[in-house]
Amino acid sequence: MLVAAGVLGIIGGLAGIVGSFFALTVGGLGATFGAEGAEAVVGLGWVALVFALGGTVGGGLAFARPRPAAWLMLASAVGGTVCISMGYVVAAPLLLVASILAFLVKKVPGQTAE
């Protein structure tokens, strides 16, 4: 379960990065054509990028410290969804499943990753 949590977290984080770039692109195009509220979309796209990077870090951290990694991936899933909802539609479920798997890992001190 530890490997699955790490791999899903990394893939989910990368999908979140793609989704945030999508939101940044849409917001930039909206600002170019003078759409109302486009600046907010750009701002939320940047915040979602930070959450996606946090999810990627959480996926990598899952191998060494699964419990903090689970919290990081959970925060990334929720925060990214709040920021750019449909842009995070692929990343959020992956990060959510990865965080659940990381929470379920029973790591004994001195045990190596399986």
Image (cartoon, rainbow, N blue to C red):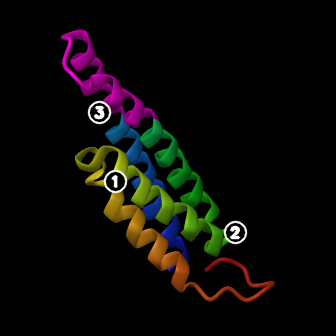
Mark 1 vs 2, N-terminal side: 2
- Give the residue displayed 36% in from the left and 45% down from the top: 83
Give the prevailing secondary structure in the magenta stretch: helix
Q: Is residue 64 magenta?
A: no
Q: Position of residue 90 (x, y in %)?
A: 28, 54
- Image position, residue 84 (x, y; %): 31, 44
The residue tagged 3 is: 22
Q: In x, y percent, where is residue 33?
A: 18, 11
Q: Quick check: 34 above or below 41? A: above
Mark closer to the chain start, 1 or 3: 3
CA gap between label 1 and label 2 equals 26 Å
- Name the residue beneath numbered marker 1: 81
Which circle, 1 or 3, is nearer the viewer?
Answer: 1
Task: Specify few, some or many for label 1: CA neighbours under 10 Å numbering under 14, 14-19, or 20 or more.
Answer: many
Location of mark 2 (residue):
64
Q: Residue at x 59, y 53 (%)?
A: 57
